[in-house]
Image (tube, helix red, strand yellow):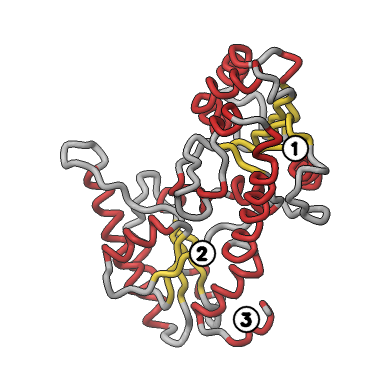
Amino acid sequence: MALLERFPDANILLQYAGRGYHKYGCPYWLPLALKQWRKKHPSQSLLVMFHELWASLPIWKKHFLTETLNSKITKELISLADAVGCLTLHQAERLRALVPSAKISWIPVGTNIIPTEFVDASFTQRSPKEFLIFGLQYTRLLTLQELSDSLKKLYSRGLLEQLHLIGPLETRWDSEEKQLLAEILPTHAVKFHGVIPPEKVSQFLHRVGFSIIGQPPENLTKSSTFMAFASHACNVISPYAATTAVEPVCYLTHPQELLQNKFSDVENDLAARGHNLWNWYKINADWQTNTNKIAKMLHNEDFLAIAS
């Protein structure tokens, strides 16, 4: 409240992740502080963006009470807000179920890796046998565990020659990641790049044939890693891929598709998916698109003019 009092004419954009405010994810003091602010500044706007939601747990679980409190906090924040947004459609459904009268806007995250050159969805400029995993070491480890058998088969059939890993090294997961990789691929087929500048990550995403992600579909639209792939029209290998699924999951590629077909037979289809994935990103998650969505949520014409 002391900080807010320094900016009496400010609107608030609250990025809400409960564990960012309280180790158990239940900042019980937050709605009270915002109620006091709202009383003092009734003409100012509050936009709440939910990054995480409460977990629905059985009563015997040790976090049942704190997660129940977290749902109460979420409900109070919605009642205080002028506009509410979230990162995934799954989150939007849960928030609407909690407060049926609330208008919830879906705003996926954008990419932190901006394309450094013209985005080409075709394979003419790509290396189809180069694959890439990008992100934190624990996330990479989960992806490798999910797709270990598929990566072995892709390599044994000559479809994968080089696997690039980009992101932090030598964390607590270092030995486990390297041990698992040693079981999947020979040493010469794996290249660790560590943390590199965004421009160099972009160069890889323009060049490699496939990126790899292991996250379930409901988490994709809150993954800046996935958005980095999509913004570069880079085809994404996923164990959850299905052409009959909803966007953007229908534009992903299951490893079995590569294993069961000649590459020449699916090349045009892969190029189309890369283009469709990029187009989906531009329509739904591009930073310009997100800025316009937020401006409209706040009914801020000045903001909307700047965004346009």
Mark 3: give few (<14), some (14-19) or many (20+) Cα within 10 Å. Answer: some
Which mark is drawn over residue 303? 3
Residue 233 position in % (x across, y down)? 69, 50
Residue at image position (49%, 28%) is 146
**Number of labelled discs?**
3
Residue at image position (49%, 61%) is 15
Residue 94 position in % (x across, y down)? 32, 58
Residue hosting label 1:
208
Q: In the drawing, does residue 35 fall left or right of residue 266?
A: left
Q: Is residue 235 above or below residue 189?
A: below
Residue 84 position in % (x across, y down)? 42, 70
Residue 212 position in % (x across, y down)? 61, 36
Quadrant position of residue 57: top left
- Quick one: 26 or 165, which is closer to the camera? 165
Marks 2 and 1 sit apart, C-alpha to C-alpha, by: 28 Å
Name the quarter where the N terminus is drawn.
bottom left
Q: Is residue 19 above or below residue 259?
A: below
Q: Evaluate if marks 3 and 2 touch, with contact meaning CB atoms under 8 Å apart.
A: no
Marks 3 and 2 sit apart, C-alpha to C-alpha, by: 17 Å
Q: Which marked residue is nearer to the observer: mark 3 or mark 2?
A: 2
Q: Earlier in the sequence, mark 3 or mark 1?
A: 1
Residue at image position (66%, 84%) is 305
- Label 3's element? helix
Mark 2: give few (<14), some (14-19) or many (20+) Cα within 10 Å. Answer: many
Which amino acid type corresponds to the residue marked 3 in the rendered image? Phe
Q: Earlier in the sequence, mark 3 or mark 2?
A: 2
Residue hosting label 2:
107
Q: Earlier in the sequence, mark 2 or mark 1?
A: 2
Which amino acid type corresponds to the residue marked 1 in the rendered image? Val
